[in-house]
Image (cartoon, rainbow, N blue to C red):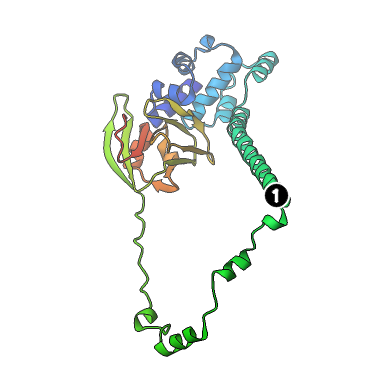
Amino acid sequence: MSLVLDSKEAKLSKGYSLDDLQEITKIQKRYLVGIEEGNYSIVPGTFYVRAFIKQYAEAVGLKSEELLEQYKNEVPSTTPEEVTQSVTYTPTRRNSRSSGKMMETAPKIIVALFIIVIIAVIWFLYSQKVQNTPEDEQVDETQFEYDQKPTPTPNENDETSGSGEGEATDEETDTEEPVEEEPAEEQSITVSETRTEADGSITTVNELSNTETLNIKVVVSGDTWVGIQDANRAEQITADVYRAGDEVTFDATANGYARIRLGNANNAKIFINDIEVPYTTNPQERGKSVQNMIFKFAEEATQE
């Protein structure tokens, strides 16, 4: 066996085409062809040869480190200069994600501080106004309430006691029956369409009812490719390969529409408003084909 044969065999067992691998790994198709044919000269530098082989192997389910060690005589080794240059100019995904989260959180913190300052200023001005009000201008609320309730005369007391008014009637003593509130309708998700696209991927259209929110969470249990787009196919979450334990979250309420694209759906669970959505395709189809899961509010007719 050789590295080339092992790679092709793993790719075929997964049911992937070169186009699928290009989407999953983000490696140009011509470099993938060079790796499959053992023609490493077309790859720009030996460092990228090893890096591309590792990404290819992980995408088709092979252990990349063991594969490189087994066929180390076939794969060109990297020089220290290439490793240093690559590490210097290639930003890590972790730093990119951390900086992105900071950029999203910073405006919210600034707005919260601004609101706190406004409340403090209003409270200070109100306190100053109360302290500066003269005592003779302040209203004696207790005296005002007393003046509004004159003491009844003795005759009025006699008439009231003799007439029997004020006694509780049968109607007043009856207890009112509690009004039963109708239970709120639970969120429902209806599959309105399932189709196979020209590229072999399977698209499932889901319509949401009895909810005003569209919060998405994808829980990843193994290597899989995840991307989220809006109705115009603009990326809301950058498509990438995620590992076991990763979670991809996005609030699509404002759009009322989301298109989730999964490279290996057997390794991912989808939750809408914290409720898991079952797949309509069987596990074999999910393992071989890319899944497009569309979610939209039932009353809206957005383009797919």
Instruction: Mark 1: give few (<14), some (14-19) or many (20+) Cα within 10 Å.
Output: few
Q: Is mark 1 on a helix, strand or loop?
A: helix
| Image: 82 above or below 117 | above
Left or right of 118, for residue 289: left
- Mark yes or no: residue 2 visible: no
Q: Which residue is drawn at the image coordinates 59% and 19% (left, top)? A: 73
Name the quadrant of the C terminus: top left
Outermost residue toward the top in this view: 41
Question: In which image quadrant can residue 160 be found?
Answer: bottom left
Q: Which residue is drawn at the image coordinates 47% and 20% (left, top)? A: 4
Left or right of 37, for residue 90: right
- Return the x and y of residue 42 as percentages of the image width and height: 51, 9
- Return the x and y of residue 214 as percentages of the image width and height: 41, 41
| Image: 199 above or below 142 | above
Total number of numbered labels? 1
Outermost residue toward the bottom in this view: 162
Q: Which residue is drawn at the image coordinates 35% and 35% (left, top)? A: 294
Between 15 and 243, the residue placed more toward the observer is: 243
Q: Name the residue under label 1.
A: 127
- Return the x and y of residue 111 as percentages of the image width and height: 60, 36
- Mark yes or no: residue 185 visible: yes
